[in-house]
Image (tube, helix red, strand yellow):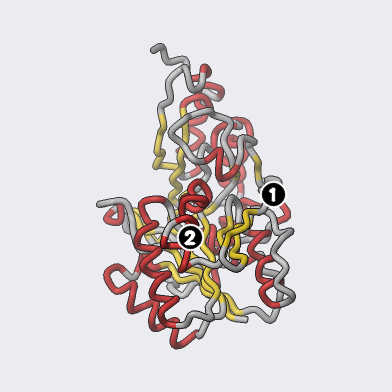
Amino acid sequence: MRILLIGSPVTVLGFDRVTKLPNLGLNSIAANVINKDTQIKVLDLVLAGKGSIQYLLNHLKSFNPDVIGFSCMSFQYDDTMKLARLVREYNNKIKIVIGGYHPTVDYENILKSDDSQFIDFIIRNEGEITFNLLIEQIRGSGNYQDLPSLSFRDNDKFIHNPPGNPLELNNLKLPDRGSRVFKRGFHILGNPADVVETSRGCTNRCKFCSIRQMYGTKFRKYKIERVIRDIKSARDYGARAILFSDDNIPIDAVRFEMLCKEIIQNKLNHIKYAIQASIPGFKQASGLPKLMSKAGIDICFLGIENSINNPLCGIEV
């Protein structure tokens, strides 16, 4: 079986001038498909630009996939559906799967809309385990009833299976960076770049954020030695800059300090790192910014919540 996983070409307006990054989630899904007879390619159309349709058509012809998976956020959804329509018109026997943040939070409305004709399956929440199980059922008996967090077509209606439990992250394999069609071109401020994940989930109660719906309210962590192996993998594939994609990496400030020390100990602090963070972690560990600097973390996207969302912030309203 041949599987093509596709990252959206759409970015936040102007943001692609600063950085273009691979879709790490698709690389993780590719790594965790178990069947050895499966061929998987990850096509990050963010590097294709205005040529994304032609790139997709070329791979439909040359790779001849049996299954195509799309990942999208809300601002990418309309363009994703245009690509799904193209796939359906090219070969209606190709199974089309969509997942990511927008399908997770709005799957019921999506499947009530005209877009449902271009979708066979929606995977809600984390995709690694469910996608692997789905591929096994597509190859086999087609029994989709017991697959967690799966929405699927059953004749003229859609069935929404109950959500699964949050994944045990340390059971997941390292992302399959070798499955990428584009080997080069990702960057942060011109430095060859990649993405690494050290945790999932956030304990904050911010009403504007979809993280709780996607990953849950528990802060789940990869073992630090696993994170170091992932950084080394990204480095070996050419990365000289890395975004830690965690939604709020310093929630556990002690662990984050340990990670910074391990980066330094393993002489990986020549790499430039970027993180996303909120205030409370820095309040818990006053020396953290200096340690981050020594570890090579020189970009921080800082979210400043108010005291209603998180009393640890110490910000009066």
Residue toward you, 185 or 310: 310
Front-most of 44 and 136?
136
Q: Quadrant of residue 215?
A: top right
- Whether pointer 2 and pointer 1 mark residues with C-beta atoms closer than 8 Å, the reply is no
73 lies above or below 179: above
Residue 310 in the image: state x and y as whole percent.
51, 21
Which marked residue is nearer to the observer: mark 2 or mark 1? Answer: 1
Count of all numbered marks drawn on residues in the image: 2
Task: Specify the quadrant that holds the N terminus.
Answer: bottom right
- Taking the view exactly as shown, the residue that stands out farthest to the front is 156
Dot 2 or dot 1: first in sequence order is: 2
Could you tell me residue 268's position as x and y percent? Answer: 54, 52
* Callout 2 secondary element: strand
189 left or right of 108 in image? left
Q: Residue at x 47, y 55 (%)?
A: 112
- Mark 2: few/some/many CA within 10 Å (<14, 14-19, 20+): many
Name the residue that disc number 2 marks: 71
The amino acid type, in three-letter code, at marker 2 is Ser
Name the mark on residue 164: 1
Give the side of residue 38 with respect to residue 275, left or right: right
Q: Nearer the viewer, residue 23 or 105?
A: 105
Quarter of the image that includes the C terminus:
top left
Q: Secondary structure at mark 1?
A: loop
Residue 53 horizontal/vertical position (percent): 33, 74
> How far apart, in angstroms, are the residues tagged by discs 2 and 1?
19 Å
Residue 125 in the image: x percent, y percent?
59, 50
Residue 224 lies left or right of residue 19; in this view the side is: right
Q: Is residue 41 above or below residue 173?
A: below
Residue located at (58% from left, 59% from top): 158
- Say which amino acid is labelled 1: Gly
